[in-house]
Structures are given as structure tokens and as C-alpha cells.
Image (cartoon, grey):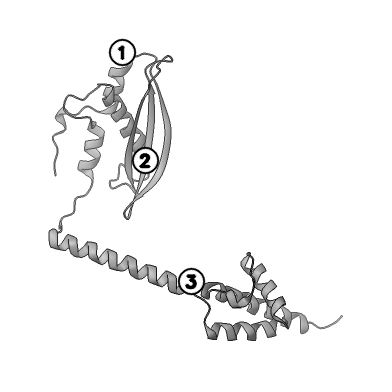
Amino acid sequence: MAYDLGGYVDVPTRLRLALKDWPKLRIQETASTLEQVGEQLFMVCVVTVWRDETDPIPVIASAAEQIPGRTPYTRNAERMVGFTSALGRALGYMGYGIDKSIASHDEIKHRQDAPQDPWPLDEKQEQKRALSQIVEKEANKRKMVSSNGVMTVPQGKMLKIQAKKAGFADDDALTLFCAEALGKDLASVNDLSKVDASKCIEALIKQANKTTETEVEEPF
């Protein structure tokens, strides 16, 4: 979609107009935070504008810039573009350059330059895509739950085999070793999850290899 930019005022022009009225005007880049909206990441930039040092109620405005930027001019410069857009909106709130819109020339130009989808989806296709995303999300949840379940019987057998090779004769010693390997408290190896059991088995294999290497060393 093309925009007629003739009636939009850019940020430098708005700032010059404001400085004529408020020579002591001061601007602060107050904050920048990352926010997730759906699958898209945005940088939200906030600016504060004081008309002078006695201004009791400064103007505060924000703008969100997509990351990564969708144009060559915004990519890798999202933070600067976000603060510029926020400043344009703050100056617009103060009444500068809003004959046509609160948005500045800069904001509209960046949106115009952003690539448009050449094959937009119709309503049924949008619904199908949304349903697919929901199904995929639920499937990922089930996978996560499955991977965090209690360790399997084969894992338990492998744990015992590798523990014996590593020289751990009783469950208490094995539990202490696994707790140290995982970096957390552990009441019993029977409480291990699938993920934690895999980590402990790997640690036991490494320990068994160290023990073997020590045993085969020739004495001086």
C-alpha cells in the first residue's frame, strides 16, 4: 500500500518547531524493552520530553519497532529508529506537525518501505493457519511433558550399569553423585526425570572412563 507523504511532518522538523517555542527543551531516552507479540519480537522505546527545567508534567511517549527490522534502513538500527519514532509521537502530543496525523513522516515511510505480503491469505486460509499454529503449540506442550516424565526402565538399568563401572557400590553414593552432576538436591535416583537421567548416565560414563584411565597407568 502506497502512502502520500506530502502532508506528514518528519521528526527533525517537529523538533525544530518545538525548540523555537521551548529553547530549553530537553529529551531523555527513558527506556527500551523487548516484548513478544505472538511470534514477533518488538523493541518498545520510551522518551520523555521536558519543555524546560521547571516543567512539572513532561510528555512521555513510546513506539514499538519490529526486530529484526523489515527494511534495510531499520535492520540493525531498531533501537535508534524506535526512539526517533517515540520522539516524533511525543512532539506530536505537544501539538507539533499533526495537521494530518500524529504519526511522523519517518514512521509512515518506514512502514511504506516494509515488504508487503504478495499473496495475502483469505479468511479461510487465515483460520486454517491459526488452527495449525494451535495444533503445533499443543503438540510441543505434549513433547515437553513427555521429555520431563519419570525416567524409563531402560534408563534405570543403564544408570545402574554405569554406576557399577564408575565404582559406586550403593544407592546413597550414586544419589550423591547424581545430585552433584545435576547441581540440585536429590532424595533418590528413582526420582530422576528422563532428561536428568540422561545427564547422570553421561556423567557416569565420563567418570567410569576416568577410573579406567587411572587403573591402566603404569607405576613409576
Q: Which residue is mark 3?
A: 148
Q: Residue furthest right?
A: 220
Nearer to us in this view, 141 or 44: 141
Where is residue 64 drawn, in percent x and y?
32, 41
Which image quadrant is residue 90 in?
A: top left
Residue occupying image coordinates x 34% and y 34%: 62
Above or below, 127 against 162 in this view is above
* Quadrant where the image shows the C terminus: bottom right
Q: Which residue type does callout 2 highlight?
A: Val
Q: Earlier in the sequence, mark 1 or mark 2?
A: 1
Distance of label 2 from label 3 (alpha carbons): 35 Å
Where is residue 114 drawn, in percent x and y?
23, 46
Q: Earlier in the sequence, mark 3 or mark 1?
A: 1
Q: Which residue type does callout 3 highlight?
A: Asn
Where is residue 55 drawn, in percent x and y?
40, 16
Nearer to us in this view, 104 or 114: 104
Q: Nearer the viewer, mark 1 or mark 2?
A: 2
Distance of label 1 from label 2 (alpha carbons): 28 Å
Above or below, 78 against 37 in this view is above
Where is residue 5 drawn, in percent x and y?
16, 33
Nearer to us in this view, 101 or 76: 101
